[in-house]
Image (cartoon, coloured by chain):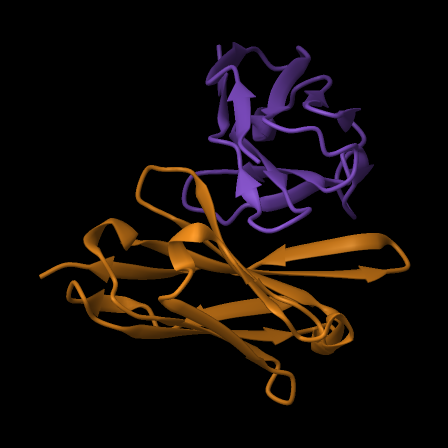
Chain colours: A orange, B purple
Amino acid sequence: EVQLVESGGGLVQPGGSLRLSCAASGFTFSIAWINWVRQAPGKGLEWVGRSNRKTDGETVQYGEPAKGRFTISRDDSKNTVYLQMNSLQTDETAVYYCAAYYYDDSGLRGFWGQGTLVTVSS
Amino acid sequence: IVLTQSPGTLSLSPGEGATLSCRASQNFGSTYLAWYQQKPGQAPRFLIYDTSSRATGIPDRFSGSGSGTEFTLSISRLEPEDFAVYYCHYYGSSPFTFGQGTKLEIK
């Protein structure tokens, strides 16, 4: 059974930093693209960034709000992806989800974690 | 690429068919467009990828179509569990984007 478990959320002051983790199990982690997506309370989905596979050069892509402040990294030996967030602002209060995608014989598979809440407030 | 979904809210009855639209600000062919379903308090559920391919385990009453800048998610014979918010998602070239969502509610 595929599982994605986000952790590391909580309360942080404006201007502060937080590191989220996404621990995966139930599939071959190294062949998956891992995305971070956030959702502010009562709002829609916003793409944060994506960690690409080793076969894609293990590159990382970021959405505009994340550029220069957020860093995504992965550790295939631990089946874990990280999201380091710096200089957080109050409007970045949201549930942060990780989502994994990979191909198998059935086609493209996509799985999401249950999310971790980040609250930016003084 | 900006994705604009319409309508914002769609009110229908179980058993009816639903058509949800997603318009892109640029033509990107027929690959890299996905659809998600989200219910309150839950993570999004992966429904459709590459415009028209159903993800594993998704009922065949869900279908996707379109190309260029116009995309559609169709749901035939609505079941009570289908009432939710639906998002389209572009995942071609970075930055990837989501539409603002269409809420499908029970009439």
Q: Percent from the top left, x then y, of residue B35?
A: 65, 36
In the picture, measured across the screen, residue B23 lies left or right of residue B101, that is right
Residue depicted at 48% across the width and 10% down the height: B107
Extreme-bottom residue of the structure: A77
Residue at the image point whose x is 40% and y is 67% from the top: A70
Q: Residue at x 30, y 43 (%)?
A: A41
Residue A121 in sight from this viewpoint: yes
Horizontally, residue A105 falls left or right of residue B81, namely: right
Residue A84 placement: quadrant: bottom left
Q: Nearer the viewer, residue A1 or A85?
A: A85
Viewport quadrant of the C terminus of chain A? bottom left
User: Does A34 sit left or right of A67 as displayed?
Assistant: right
Confirm whether residue B62 shows in the render.
no
Above or below, B51 against A64 in this view is above
Asked whether B35 or A64 is in front, the reply is A64
Coordinates of residue B50 in the picture (x, y in percent)? 78, 40
Image quarter (top left, top right, bottom left or bottom right) of the N terminus of chain A: bottom right
Residue at the spot 71% in from the left edge and 75% down from the top edge: A57
Percent x, y of residue A101: 69, 59
**Compared to A73, does A100 lie above or below?**
above
* Looking at the image, residue A60 lies above or below residue A66: below
